Image: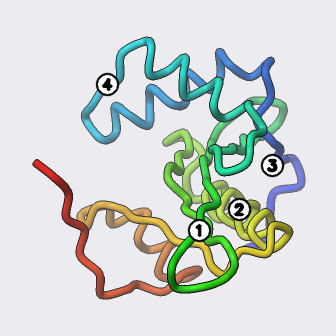
Amino acid sequence: MTRDPSLVIRPLGAADEAEWRRLWRAYLAFYQTERPEPVLATTFARLLSGKPNEFSGFLAVLDGRPVGLVHYLFHRTCWAVEDICYLQDLYADPEVRGRGIGRALIEAVYAAADRHGAATVYWMTQDFNATARRLYDRIGVLTPFVKYQRP
């Protein structure tokens, strides 16, 4: 797939809050959930903090309009000396899906992980997220792990 020349992937900035909130709320709605205002405000502040071991983010901007986001975090692991990178959230507006937005955002995280010296990048998705999984099957490796969490 050839990348659209009008697509720009760039770090999230303070001036992006309104568009980030629009995209973030749409992402949450896709997963049939909402988060209260303190969570949105805290999440955005964390994304911009620049602190070690804090979340970072990129925006996908197409023809000057933000159309996608990704959040990621570097953290330690007992399985390697280097940090690893957790790609937590990935979203593209439905009207631009199929145009390489998700791939470009993941590749931006891959590049950030390489610059950081991270041993790997990993992420999760719901098993029924067939559209996203078609992309993930092309640019990642499905692992046999099953996630559990405290009730």
Which image quarter: residue 133? bottom left
User: Which residue was labeled with disc 3?
Assistant: 9
Looking at this view, is 112 or 63 the one in front? 112
Q: Nearer the viewer, mark 3 or mark 1?
A: 1
Looking at this view, is 96 or 136 the one in front? 136
**Residue 90: x percent and y percent?**
53, 51
Considering only order in the chain, which callout, 4 or 1, is on the residue closer to the N terminus? Answer: 4
Name the residue: 55% across, 52% down.
Answer: 97
Considering only order in the chain, which callout, 4 or 3, is on the residue closer to the N terminus? Answer: 3
**Residue 51: x percent and y percent?**
74, 40
Name the residue: 54% across, 39% down.
Answer: 93
Total labels drawn:
4
Considering only order in the chain, which callout, 1 or 3, is on the residue closer to the N terminus? Answer: 3
Q: Nearer the viewer, mark 1 or mark 4?
A: 1
Q: Look at the numbered disc 1 and give the secondary structure of its residue.
A: loop
Which quarter of the figure is the N terminus placed in?
A: bottom right
Cα distance in 3D space between marks 1 and 4: 29 Å
